[in-house]
Amino acid sequence: MHDTSTAAAAAPFWRTKSLDEMDPAEWESLCDGCGRCCLVKLQDEDTDAIAYTDIGCKLLDDFGCRCRNYPDRQAQVPDCVRLTPQTVRALDWLPPSCGYRLVEEGRDLYWWHPLVSGDPESVHAAGVSVRGKVAALEDELPLEDFIDHMVRWPLRLPRGAVRRKARG
C-alpha cells in the first residue's frame, strides 16, 4: 500500500499549494530574481498590446536583478504592479518563466529556479535574468526613445533554460 501522506509531505510547497494558499515567505520565494517583470512595458493605445523594452524600472538593480527598494517601491513607482494571486491571473504580460505564472498554470518550476537549484545565481547562469541585457534605466532616457528599445527576448526562454541541466 502506498502512503500518499508521506509523498505529499515530501513534495515542495509549489506543487501542493495554490497561490492563494501560500504564506508570505513561500509567496516571496516564488520570485526567481530574473528581473523580467521589472522591464518597462509599452502598451499600444489602439490595441492594448503590450511590448517589452530592454529598459529597466528606475529601481531595478540591473546586476542583482532585484528592486533596490522593494518595501517602498509603490510609493516611488506608482505604476509598479504588486503581484497577488488575483493580479497573476489577470496579467498577460508575465514572462513565460515566471514562477507565479507557472504555479498558477499548474506547471513545475524550471531547473534553474532558486527553489529547485538551491542557488540564487542559477537564474543568471541559465541566461534567464536581465543581467547584462538592460540598455538603461527608465530615468536615464527620454520617453520618446523608449519605442526604440522594444525587444522580444523577455517573452522567450533561452534554449538551455528549458532543458534540464545535465548532472555531472
Image (cartoon, rainbow, N blue to C red):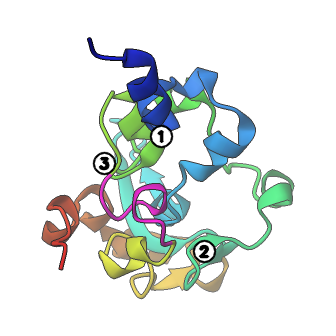
Mark 1 in CB contact with mark 2 (< 8 angstroms): no
Is residue 24 found left or right of 157 in the rendered image?
A: right
Is residue 127 shown to the viewer in this render?
A: yes
Q: Residue at x 41, y 49 (%)?
A: 98
Q: Answer yes or no: is residue 92 visible.
A: no
Read off the magenta span.
110-119
Secondary structure, mark 2, is helix
Residue where numbered disc 1 is placed:
100
Q: Left or right of 121: which side holds 50?
A: left
Q: Alpha-carbon neighbours of circle 2 within 10 Å: few (<14), some, or many (≥20)?
A: some
Q: Percent position (x, y) of residue 162?
A: 18, 59
Asked if the residue under mark 3 is in contact with the one under mark 1, i.e. CB atoms within 8 Å, the reply is no
From the viewer's side, name the closer residue of 7 and 60: 7
At 37% from the left and 17% from the top, the residue drawn is 4
User: Distance from label 3 to label 2 (Cα)?
Assistant: 23 Å
Q: Residue furthest front?
A: 1
The disc, 3 or 2, on the residue closer to the chain's N-terminal end is 3
Residue at label 3?
96
**Secondary structure found at label 3:** loop
83 over 32 or under it: above or below? above
Determine crowd level at label 3: few under 14, some 14-19, many 20+ residues with C-alpha closer than 10 A: some
- Viewed as shown, does residue 2 lie left or right of 48? left
Q: Residue drawn at (67%, 51%), measured in percent from left and top?
A: 80
**Label ID, residue 138:** 2
Name the residue type under label 1: Tyr
Q: Is residue 128 above or below residue 74?
A: below
Mark linked to residue 135? none
